[in-house]
Amino acid sequence: VSEAFYRHPTALVESSDIGPHTRIWAFAHVMRGVRIGREVNVGDHCFIETGVSIGDGVTIKNGVMLWEGVRVENFVFIGPGVVFTNDRNPRSPRFPPVAERYRGKRWLSLTVVEESASIGANATLLSGITIGRFALVSAGAVVTGDVPAHGLAMGVPARVVGYVSDTGRRLKFSKTGEARCPETGRRYRLRRGKILYVD
Amino acid sequence: VSEAFYRHPTALVESSDIGPHTRIWAFAHVMRGVRIGREVNVGDHCFIETGVSIGDGVTIKNGVMLWEGVRVENFVFIGPGVVFTNDRNPRSPRFPPVAERYRGKRWLSLTVVEESASIGANATLLSGITIGRFALVSAGAVVTGDVPAHGLAMGVPARVVGYVSDTGRRLKFSKTGEARCPETGRRYRLRRGKILYVD
Amino acid sequence: VSEAFYRHPTALVESSDIGPHTRIWAFAHVMRGVRIGREVNVGDHCFIETGVSIGDGVTIKNGVMLWEGVRVENFVFIGPGVVFTNDRNPRSPRFPPVAERYRGKRWLSLTVVEESASIGANATLLSGITIGRFALVSAGAVVTGDVPAHGLAMGVPARVVGYVSDTGRRLKFSKTGEARCPETGRRYRLRRGKILYVD
């Protein structure tokens, strides 16, 4: 049968819910039931587990692992080697004292990456958090809590050290509380930790 | 020949010392001579080098690399993307001034992960260390020294910031020096940095 | 046709510019146009993108991803799970407001790892930087700027905390400003942040 998406000959694709113009590269593994939108790029050596949902226009660079409980919205960028998690208190499920805990799904905690956010290379995301729209997580950061929309999060543990524009440029606020994106000229205002569009 | 363990068709398994009910998943590579116990789960894209020994009931999530000199005891959890090491002063062995050093095994330093410990996602373990029984290394930590039994290690470099129960729950000690696991109710006492069972 | 280099049967090697005695291991992927010198070792699950140049005698441990814009000189050691980058403001290229930016190569920033340097396991390198000759980046470090020749860089973000010898040993400078490598006996002097050879 013809498929509207591309898969590299070595990729394992067990899902049939994949949008057109999506490309899945070498040695990647997409499990059954995964939902992937259109025009998504899944790099070499990625692993996407049953229960994951990925929007349209997403870029997932090489070696990324996405677990059940992760939702990735449209136009997100996930850098190489980013590691998601879905368990705040991991133990091996065959260790008898925790076998009961792992019988159901109570151990599972959810993570959402909202539209057009970017996660830098080799960042680690603890579970149970939301990365807001247009946020930028720096490379190597370890994110332990929510990142607000447009927030720039950095370090271990990650702290919000500033804000970025829709296109990912650092915003420098003037004394009047306004900033202009150096790339697009779009104006932003910061009010009580929230970014507002001026125009 | 029939095998008592499962290997994904794309997995490379060169060892024959693998226990029953162990599962080795896609694009993983287990070299010859590796010893793996029973009911172990080795995720996609893992690499396990000759000289590694893994106990029973261990969970090794995807993309983990285990090198010669690493010993993993029963019921350990190793999170996705965890990176072990075995050389404290790495140089490329073909660099002539170090060629002599790499002829033998003097450069090799050993790492032990003791029973039922957990290593969080994308943590990095320097070599020559021991992760004690029931210890919990947080996601993204860079561990440069020993972690005591039940210790909770966090950060870069990792520090012991508290203690966890057998099942991995944070212990909060009362003024009498006792803590109760919120999951099992088991009682613990902390004496001179060591966790003791009250019951 | 015979090839002077070794490729594992599962490796994807699309380049023909690979030197003799180089070995490319399981599930690795080397794209077309990549230049790799002689006696290089490329570990399992590595990915090397078109536009990368690698010198002679280099060791690239497993799971390393090298992107367009990265140049690796002779005798470099790159530890397991090291992640390079080439974009300081990443967004998904299909996000319409950045589509124009990703049409050309203006977004690309270059990284150089100079001769005989070592990058420790699971380190992250931001782009647009140079790792100097004989430098040693510690495991798990997040490098955001240049590291000088012989510099020892550590932490998140990485700081230069000392210096190492040609063979990677920490140098301890005496009051006279001189240090001797504990491995080779070679003498070094530190002047204005630069390492000089005494002999």
Image (cartoon, coloured by chain):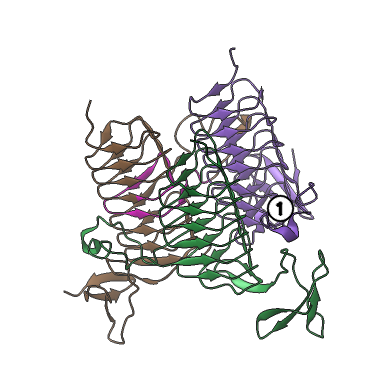
Chain colours: A brown, B purple, C green
Viewer-closest of B164 and A153? A153
Residue C164 percent coordinates (x, y): 71, 69
* A153 relative to B11, above or below: below
* A28 relative to C35, above or below: above
Query: Is A109 contained in the magenta span?
Result: no
Viewer-closest of A14 and A106? A14
Query: Is A77 contained in the magenta span?
Result: yes
- The local crowd at label 1, few if under 14, some if 14 to 19, many if 20 or more residues have their Cα within 10 Å, is some
Classified by dominant secondary structure, the portion drawn in magenta counts as loop
Figure quadrant of residue C69: bottom left
Residue located at (58% from left, 63% from top):
C141
Residue A125 percent coordinates (x, y): 46, 53
Secondary structure at badge 1 equals: loop
Q: Chain of mark 1?
A: B
> Can residue B105 be seen by looking at this rendering?
yes
Residue B84 percent coordinates (x, y): 64, 48
* B63 relative to C122, above or below: above
In the picture provided, is C137 more to the left or to the right than A187? Answer: right
> Can residue A143 be seen by looking at this rendering?
no
Figure quadrant of residue C91: bottom left
Amino acid type assigned to the residue bearing label 1 in the image: Asp
Residue named by callout 1: B87
In the picture provided, is C123 more to the left or to the right than B105? Answer: left
Image quadrant occupied by the C terminus of chain B: top right
* A155 relative to B108, above or below: below
Q: Which residues are magenta?
A: A60-88
Residue located at (37% from left, 41% from top):
A25
Image quadrant occupied by the N terminus of chain B: top right
